[in-house]
Image: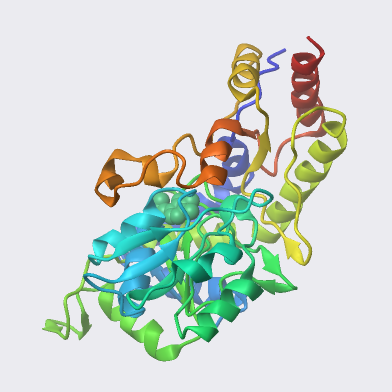
Amino acid sequence: MNTNIPYLDLKAQMRPLRAEIDAVIAHTLDNCSFCLGPDVAQFEKDFAAFCGAQHAVAMNSGTSALHVAMILAGVGPGDEVITTPYTFIATSWAISYVGAKPVYVDIEDATFNLDPKLVERAITPRTKAILPVHLYGHPCELDALLALAHKYNLPLIEDAAQAHGATYRGKSVGTFGQTACFSFYPAKNLGAAGEGGALVTNDAALAARARALREHGSTKRYHHDELGFNYRMEGLQGAVLGVKLKHLAAWAEGRRRVARRYAELLAGTPLRLPREAEGCASAWHLYTVRSDRRDALKAHLDANGIGNAVHYPMPLHLQKAYAHLGHRAGDFPHAERAAHEVLSLPMFPELTDAQIQRVATVVGEFFAK
Ligand SMILES: *Cc1c(COP(=O)(O)O)cnc(C)c1O
């Protein structure tokens, strides 16, 4: 018997959907709606409804959606955007793409998310927006961040790339800020058969401008109102995402089951386990534990065929690409400590109870040694 447990099993997700996905792909090949088109338009309606938002604008990636969100927020050269140093780097790229400067603020130890208590002192006359991330699917502290955004008249943009369906005080993330950005990269909670992303907003004018920006800055063919991009979603991706979206709520429930089970089975270990903050329901994109013996634990899991990953080994302020910001080790101690301690365990909705128990057994053996 193969007791190896993958970190993520996309094939297990595809198997039961395969016939339906084959059919929508064949349909797209028949009607030749390859860029945007009716399936993308329908997916936009359905995804907006899933989020409880008015508009979703489908794009070719979450990174593109973030770039467009920065333009919509009026961020430009010389401006500053307050954000987290502990995320996937695309969050910061978006700020850099418009010529602005990412201003990092350290994270909270408990949730890995931007610490609102540290945001206020980072605000300067050049600050143009606040860009927090719902990291690992756990909502950031939206009440406190929105209060600051309101006080200083700054737009809040949510990076919800990992948080499809997460809720904060009963409301879906993606509906709190001026705009929110989602990714449909295959490994995300809702994944395309390739790249994909969406910008979500309740503002009709912003949605209309986002639609123009993703299509070369035009609303009328060959008439270009501003510098635009080719950020269109492919028709095939819209068709596939339409099929998968119908399962997203059930998958979220599956992830919750896995997280609950890990919490029970790992409670007796020295690991620091992820927990939902009050008023928050995580999308459980990742199940990320902490240990000061992380590297040894990782080696033990590797040796026993248990998939795992480090999200993320290096905070953004220490990345070579951001050396020009002049940061050094010690600037953001919580982010730096997280980078040394985090380890993500297998997390996907199809994990069986036997697999979860096996992961817990292998982890238990490590600490018993
Ligand atoms: C995946 C991700 C992105 C980028 O999304 P892509 O679709 O891969 O471009 C941005 N931010 C975060 C936090 C992500 O996890």
Q: Nearer the viewer, residue 195 or 179?
A: 179
Q: Nearer the viewer, residue 79 or 266?
A: 79
Identified at 85% across, 34% down, the residue is: 267
Vertical position of residue 10 compared to residue 156: above or below: above
96 is higher (above) or lower (below) than 308:
below
Query: In the figure, 147 relative to 340: above or below?
Result: below
243 or 302, which is in the foreground?
302
- Residue at the far bottom: name it: 205
Tell me if residue 11 can be seen. yes
Tell how many labels. Answer: 0
* Quarter of the N terminus within the rendering: top right
Quarter of the view holding residue 78: bottom left
Q: Residue at x 68, y 29 (%)?
A: 291
User: x and y percent of residue 207 in the render?
Assistant: 40, 83
> Looking at the image, which is closer to me, 149 or 330?
330
Is residue 196 something one can see in this rendering? no
- At horizontal 65% and vertical 48% (from top left) the residue drawn is 109
Residue 31, how many percent across, how many down?
34, 66
Q: How was the colour assigned to the protein in this rendering?
A: rainbow
Q: x%, y% of residue 266? A: 82, 32
The spot of residue 327 in percent (x, y) is 35, 46
Q: Quadrant of the C terminus?
A: top right
Q: Quadrant of residue 70?
A: bottom left
Residue lying farthest to the left in this orientation:
222
Instruction: Decide if residue 316 is on the left or right side of residue 140.
Output: left
